[in-house]
Amino acid sequence: MEQGVFQIGPIRPPSEANSLLLRVTENCPWNKCKFCMLYKNSAFHTRPVAEVKKDIDVMAEYRDRILTHIEECGEYNMEAIQQDYLSLPSDEAKICYQMVFTWLTEGNKQAIFLQDANTMVLRPDWLIEIVCYVRERLPEIQRITSYGRANTMARISAEDFKRLRAAGLDRIHSGYESGSDKVLEMIGKGATQEDEIIGGKKVKEAGIELSIYFMPGVGGRALSDENAIETAKVINEVNPDFVRLRTFVLRTGSLMEELQASGVYRELRDMEKLLEIRKMLAHIDTKKAHGKITSDHIINLLQEVTGYMDKDLSWMLEYIDSFLALPELEQKKYQLARRMGFPLDWKYLYRMQPSDQSRVEEMAKNIVDEKEWEALLHRFTDRYI
């Protein structure tokens, strides 16, 4: 291992943007999902526990080094930090130093995320040893989180989940994508609705927070209703702490293109994916599901669709309906602005630069062919995934 370097994997949830990233496994043990291209040419490996511990030691060493640059007033001496940073032996070491600095300052020393795609596949005893060592060397950490596949979680015993929670594992993120067995099979997810329910319940019963991901539109036109309704069924059964919306976009170069070319799959229009979100929300039972719907990704059309299922569901439905009630031109203007990266809701389009407003309005008015319009939106959304 290069001096002053710890491994950093390629992905983490948006909610872990300022977290430390600790690579416990490399790549994905399943690696057959047709919508995902991230690990396609990479073999899966587990990292030796001793090697992971060395990475944790490097993180702790950088923390101690950075903290020496706090002055009596409580502020960081940024000139000293800059000199310290420039003295590092490699670009990789500088990236690691910068991550620890961001964690200390912007991340408020809050969290560490265990990478890569399915850390839960690691032997429980090994994972427990790693989690305990994080708690020992980085005691200021408030939250330890990980990715975990549904079928992997379904195989882990309830007792092992309780041991992991006692060791200090706080949250598991899991890409359920859909609650429909038909959709899960079509996209090559390698999990079933039963896996999602069994695994999710074990996680919750152990006292570990569960954050699941739903892909509106991933079932295509033929399975849109089923994707929404069966996903709501899983949410009602499991009662996850978070349901994170990740609107599906058929990515150029993915295996989903083959399904589309064969006629098996027809991608929904942008607005139809919003309607699917609404249908999913409408089938949630607020007496059973109390967690939070979160729209924390640029890929979602209506970022403001967020709130607690037992308290804010009616508001979320009304919010979607208020957008659907807008004149078509206003909807299209916002669709395009959003796909171009505009972060707020349609009520604030006036905040765009006048030149951008004019450009958006002109395109929304003049592109009347449906296929051309959807292709334009797709060119923007494809870059976000």
Image (cartoon, rainbow, N blue to C red):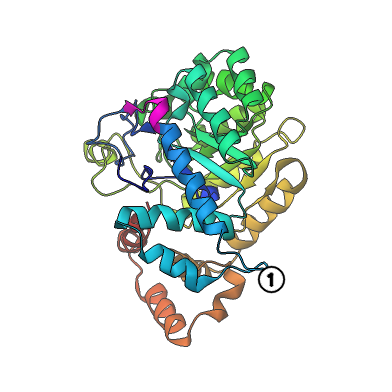
Mark 1 falls on what kind of element? loop
| Residue 190 drawn above or below residue 284 | above
Query: What is the magenta range?
Result: 45-51
Q: Above or below — where is 300 with respect to 164?
A: below
Q: Nearer the viewer, residue 333 or 296?
A: 296
Q: Type of residue at label 1?
A: Cys
Q: Nearer the viewer, residue 321 or 100?
A: 100
Hey, which quadrant is residue 118 in on the image?
Answer: top left
- 50 magenta-colored: yes
Please say if 54 is above or below 348: above
Return the residue at label 1.
73
Residue pictured at 77% horizontal, 45% vertical: 311
Residue at 29% x, 39% y is 256
Q: State left or right for residue 46 relative to residue 135.
A: left
Image x and y of residue 14, in percent: 50, 50
In which image quadrant can residue 1 be found? top left
Residue 96 on image: x %, y %: 41, 52
Residue 235 % position (x, y): 62, 31
The answer, for residue 384, to whether it is visible in the render is no
Query: 62 above or below 23?
Result: below
User: Based on the displayed image, in which of its 4 quarters is residue 161 positioned?
Assistant: top right
Res 43 visible = yes
Q: Is residue 316 magenta?
A: no
